[in-house]
Image (cartoon, grey):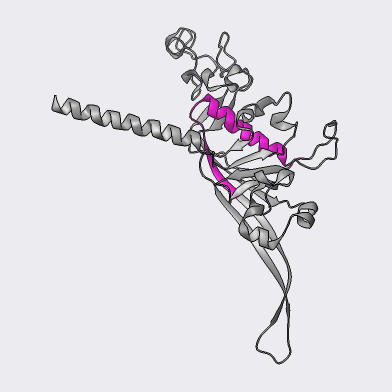
Amino acid sequence: MAQRGLQGQILHTRQQATAQDEYNYASQRDWRVILSLAPGANYLYRAQDPGIMLPLVDTDGVVFPYTPQVQVQYTANYDTSDITHSNYKIFQYKNSYVDSVTITGDFTAQDTYEANYMLAVIHFFRTITKMFYGQDSNPVNGTPPPLCYIFGLGEYQFNKHPIAITGFTYNLPNDVDYIRADVGSSAVLSRGAQSSSFRFQSTSNPSNIRLGSSDVSPGGFKPPPVWEGTREGNSVGSIQPTYVPTKMQIQISAVPIISRLDIASRFSLKDYATGQLMLGSRNGKGGGIW
C-alpha cells in the first residue's frame, strides 16, 4: 500500500507539472522562427485558392519546427588611404549596412499532416523567389517577388523584420524513409484526417492485398506492379501522390529590407541603441529595423 501511495503521489506531481507547462505555454508568445507574408497580402497561401500551400494558412506562414541556425552579417565599410613613408594606413569611414541573412533549418514528417506541411513549405519558397509574370493581374505582372517578414526568438531578435528571399536550397536525401503527402484530399485540412494508412507507401487493406489472389497469377507469375493510387478501388490518398522525406534540411538566403521612409523618418542611432527600433510589431507598418 505504501508503494502504491508513493506512485500515486508521483503521478499527481507529474500531472501538476504537465498542467503548469500547458498554462505557461498558453500564456507566453510563440517564439519559434516564422516567415510570413506582408500584412494585407492576398496571394500565395492567403489567396482564395491556396492549393498545396493550404497547410500554411493555419500558421500564417512557414513555422520552423526546430530552432534553425540564423546567420546575420552586419558590416561597417571603410576606405583606405596609403600614405607614403608611413607604417600605417589611414581608414576613412564610408558606410554601414546589413549584408545578408542565412537561415538553415530541419523539417521532419512523421504523418500525412506533416508531409503536407513540408510539401507546402517547399513550394512556398519555390514560389516566393519568382516575380509575378505572364497572366498575373493582381498583383500585376512585373511585380517583384513577394516580401517576407521574419519573427522569432523573442522581442529583440526578429520582430517583424522585412526580408527579401534571394535563394532557396533544399536537400532530398537518399538515406531516410519517404512519406506520402496526401495532396488534394481532406487530409490537408486538419490533423483529424491523419491515418496510419498514409504512411510509407502502405495501403488501405495490406493483408488482403498481400495474401489475395490478385497479386500472384496462376503458375506463380507475378503481374506488373501497381503503384499507389492506381489500384482499382484504392481509396487511399490522391490519384497522383507526392512523397517527401521524413527528414530534410533547407537553406534560405535573404537580404534585409529597410525602406527609404524608415531611414529618413524613423532611424536614430540613439533610438536604435535602446532596442526600440527592433520592435517591428509596435512600430506600425514599417516593421523592425535591422
122 is within the stretch colored magenta: yes
Q: Position of residue 69 (x, y in %)?
A: 54, 50
* Residue 230 visible within the image: yes
Please tell me which residue is depicted at 48% across the width and 29% down the height of the picture: 110
Where does residue 228 sit, x and y in percent of width and height?
56, 18
* Residue 84 point in image, percent of width and height: 73, 90
Quarter of the rendering occupied by the C terminus: bottom right
Can you name the residue that lies furthest to the left here? Answer: 1
Whether 204 is among the magenta residues is no
Q: What stretch of residues is rendered in magenta? A: 103-130
Give me the residue at 46% from left, 20% from top: 196
Where is residue 207, by image quadrant? Answer: top left
Kindly tell me whether residue 165 is visible in this rendering.
Answer: no
- Is the residue 166 above or below the residue 44 in the image? below
Residue 89's place in the image compared with 69, above or below, is below
Give the vertical position of 59 relative to 267 (above or below): above
Q: Position of residue 36 (x, y in %)?
A: 66, 38
